[in-house]
Image (cartoon, grey):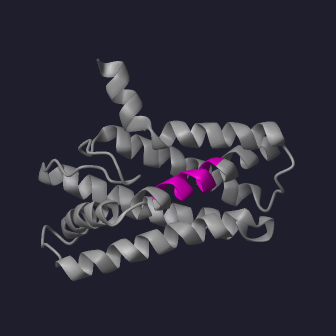
Amino acid sequence: MTEQLAVVARCLIGVVFVLSAAGKLRSRTAFAEFARSGRALTGALLGGRPIGRVAGLWVGAAVVTAEIAVVALLAVTATSRAGFALAIVLLLGFTAGLLAEMRRGTRTPCRCFGSSSTPIGRRHIVRNAALIALSAVGVAAGPIPLLHPAAAAAGAVLALVVARLDDLAELFAN
């Protein structure tokens, strides 16, 4: 069971980060919108001091590069533990930015997957906490090969649910 959970976690986290990076890179507009929301979150982390447009672009580029690194590390069994560890670092940073922005009371949209205009909220914190917990399972499990196809498929399907969480919440709210 532990192996299967680790495979679910590896596929889920990998696909989540693929979708996250792809959503931000799908167009110049998508990346610019992500960088703009990232500027707000980074500014909130810095005590409310805004960062400049160019700095926001650099932060955005660093985030997307790190997301792609997570995927690359998770793709190889021998480096999967490092991929999970990097995912934890990123998710902790994202969560800290979300919490700081929420404390400020602003309605910055969550551009985690590039397209949503839903303002950040508690569900984003809960989502990140769950992803951190799954990544911790992956770190603890160590390098486990993807030998459980059903678990891998379950992880990929769950990743799609995570990526479309805002849309699903809106659908069921109506």
Quadrant position of the C terminus in the picture: top left
Where does residue 23 sit, x and y in percent of width and height? 43, 56
One can see residue 5 in this view: no
Task: Please tell me how many numbered marks the rendered image carries.
Answer: 0
For the view shown, which residue lies furthest in the right direction? Answer: 147
Quadrant position of the N terminus in the picture: top right
Q: Is residue 159 found left or right of 169 in the rendered image?
A: right
Give yes or no for residue 38 being in the magenta stretch.
no
Report which quarter residue 52 is drawn in: bottom left
Give yes or no for residue 13 being in the magenta stretch.
yes
In the image, is residue 161 above or below residue 55?
above
In the image, is residue 85 above or below residue 65?
above
Where does residue 108 sit, x and y in percent of width and height? 20, 52
Say which of 118 and 93 sits in front: 118
Question: Which residue is rendered at x = 29% and y = 76% of the image?
Answer: 57
Question: Which residue is rendered at x = 30% and y = 61% of the image?
Answer: 34
Q: Is residue 43 found left or right of 26 in the rendered image?
A: left
In the rendered structure, which segment of residues is drawn in magenta? 12-20
What secondary structure prevails in the magenta region? Answer: helix
